Image: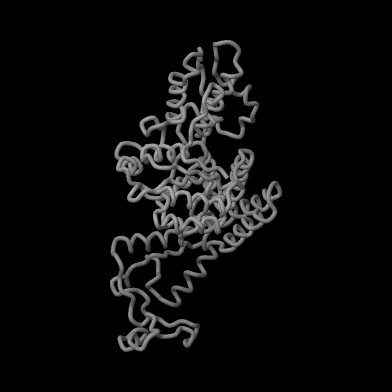
Amino acid sequence: MVVAEKLLPLQGMAEPLAERMRPQTLDDYVGQQHLVGEGAVLRKMIESGHINSFILWGPPGVGKTTLAQIVASRLHVPFYTLSAVTSGVKDVREVIERARNGKFFNAASPILFIDEIHRFSKSQQDSLLGAVERGVVTLIGATTENPSFEIIRPLLSRCQLYTLKPLDKDDLLQLLHRALTEDTVLKHRNVRVEQTGALLRYSGGDARKLLNIVDLVVNAAEGDEVLINDHVVEERLQQNPLAYDKDGEMHYDIISAFIKSIRGSDPDAALYWMARMIEGGEDPKFIARRLVISAAEDIGLANPNALLLANAAFDAVTKIGWPEGRIPLAEATVYLATSAKSNSAYLGIDAALAYVRSHGNEPVPLPIRNAPTALMKELGYHDGYRYPHDYPGNFVQQNYLPEDVQNERFWHAQHNPSEEKLYQRMLTCWGDRFRDS
């Protein structure tokens, strides 16, 4: 367990460059302008002095921990930190008790920062609920994983969610310039930058990685003169540059290429991008989750078995681990890429959501309402409902939509062989209501 009321920087020249350059204020913070820029939501909340519990979701090295420290510093409240890797339920309860005993009346709640909160088990997350709900602590969680998969719904509902993006080229170059001109060590060295391609490529949108690479190059240089170019960076790192695109593409760019290759029915491209993710150290469960999403979104009703196979691949990866897990992932990838495609269900639910959001809540027709009480039956609930299984073909025409919605269409079949059967059945049942215009 790691518990601290305040995170203090290390002292002395042995401190890594990434720590020496850690921002102390929002004005020094690089990137995430959609959250901390002038007038942005997180900046406004911090400047108001009143914050709610929130979760920061983003890839490594984009400033999640730094934001939490800036919040604590700005609010002048105790700051407790736990690592989900090393802490258990007992550790969580100890910190909550310390926070409860140390809080003054009407004072702002202490901040509990949990790094890698997605690694907390359900019981560990459950142990936070009461303290967060009662305001004993203000929770700030940091995660590199999709919170909707990894964080329990009751805890997620009590927290705002803010998504942090990988740093782009301009952000990284700004950070490099600041390090060379403001760092207490580097500004006294004669650092000459000839090229930044390899530096940006290997950083991959990660500020910490960029500064660590600069630190490595500077520390390996003899004398006060330091040269940074592509050859020097590649020589120092001795990594395989094929793991990253020459333009410094990010984690999200590669997964985007992977999904688009599946959607475009190119199994070779899909396997290539999956290999890039594997070589780059991507979490296999992240790849598996995206396959499940793609099976539902892009293959859909054209081949319902795709979703079953994608789920089976996810389950297999969880059970057998790595490196064997690459095989079921590859199997699912090829199957999805070569399968017929349909996004009719995806478009249908989005159309229905758009209608609901623009038209509000329409009343449920009386015949299809639930009638568990005598009063509801007297009011006509369930009255007139026809049970489809009592009719030939297990179907009878009746109205299932609110009166004002009856003429709306949300699902439109896409005429692949599998979905054509569904379309023809709807024509048999409903006639012109489902006929394509």
Residue drawn at x 65%, y 26% is 238
Task: Please state if 328 lies on the left or on the right of 24 as rendered.
Answer: right
Q: Is residue 113 above or below residue 344?
A: above
User: Of 101 and 168, which appears nearest the observer?
Assistant: 101
Residue drawn at x 58%, y 45% is 1
Q: Is residue 59 above or below residue 405?
A: above
Point out residue 329 in the picture as x, y percentages from the top left corner. Answer: 64, 51
The way the protein has been coloured in the rendering is: one colour
Which quarter of the figure is the C terminus placed in?
bottom left
Residue 355 position by quadrant: bottom left
Point out residue 87 in the picture as x, y percentages from the top left corner. Answer: 58, 48
Q: Is residue 390 above or below residue 184?
A: below
Point out residue 246 in the picture as x, y percentages from the top left corner. Answer: 54, 29
User: Of 317 and 154, which appears nearest the observer?
Assistant: 154
Q: Could you tell me how many numbered marks the image carries?
A: 0
User: Of 187 and 289, which appears nearest the observer?
Assistant: 187
Report whether residue 215 is seen: yes
Residue drawn at x 45%, y 73% is 426
Q: Is residue 355 above or below residue 237?
A: below
Report whether residue 337 is seen: no
Point out residue 430 in the picture as x, y percentages from the top left corner. Answer: 41, 76
User: Of 65 and 431, which appears nearest the observer?
Assistant: 65
